[in-house]
Amino acid sequence: MLAATPILLLLFSASAAAHGPHVHGKGELEITIQGAAIRGAFRTPMESLLGFEHLPKNDAQRKALEGLRQQLALASAVVLPNAEAACQPRMAEATSSIFTGMAKGEHSDLEFRFSFECGMPDRLNSLEVVALNQFRRLSEVRAVLVTTKGQRSFAVKKKDPKISVAP
């Protein structure tokens, strides 16, 4: 199992570096599962989450931005493993030019990295992309799942937000 670690990390890093175009309502998700560890990265235009992608211009936008920042403090803000796997959040990190006050031009994206450690990884059978139900403007997430058994890619939509972990 340890021999697979560099390969999985390399695949994850290469996939995360090659993200696609800025498309409102769409997101990209890369997840690696190795043993008890789940690591992921999610990218989407801020418009898909907030309804705007410029620096806040009024109190309502400032409140929405602060609410999003608080929500993204949790690893489970985007993906939630099935309860039977007893996964605990380990890390959540959200970055965006809006958060730093440096948003320029018309586009700003979210980059969200997260990880979980599962107490019962043999019971991990699905991941729910909860972001699809939490953000009404987000309609589809292109997902790449990398495990020790291979790599799969697919579209996840609101009507069926679960990703099957089984090959």
Image (cartoon, helix red, strand yellow):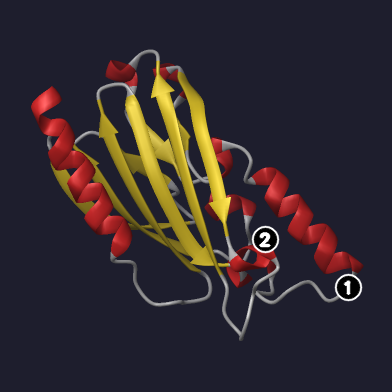
Residue 11: percent from left, percent from top: 19, 49
> Is 107 above or below relative to 63?
below
Residue 124: percent from left, percent from top: 33, 24
Task: Note whether residue 1 is visible.
Answer: no
Judge left or right: residue 69 versus residue 85. Answer: right
- Residue 58 bears which disc, if any? 1
Residue pointed to by mark 2: 99
In the picture as drawn, the residue positioned furthest to the bottom comes out as: 105
Task: Note whether residue 113 is visible.
Answer: yes
Q: Residue at x 50, y 65 (%)?
A: 44
Look at the numbered disc 1 and give the secondary structure of its residue.
loop
In the picture as drawn, the residue positioned furthest to the left comes out as: 3
In the picture as drawn, the residue positioned furthest to the top comes out as: 119
Look at the numbered disc 2 and give the secondary structure of its residue.
helix
The kind of residue tagged 1 is Asn
Q: Residue at x 22, y 42 (%)?
A: 9
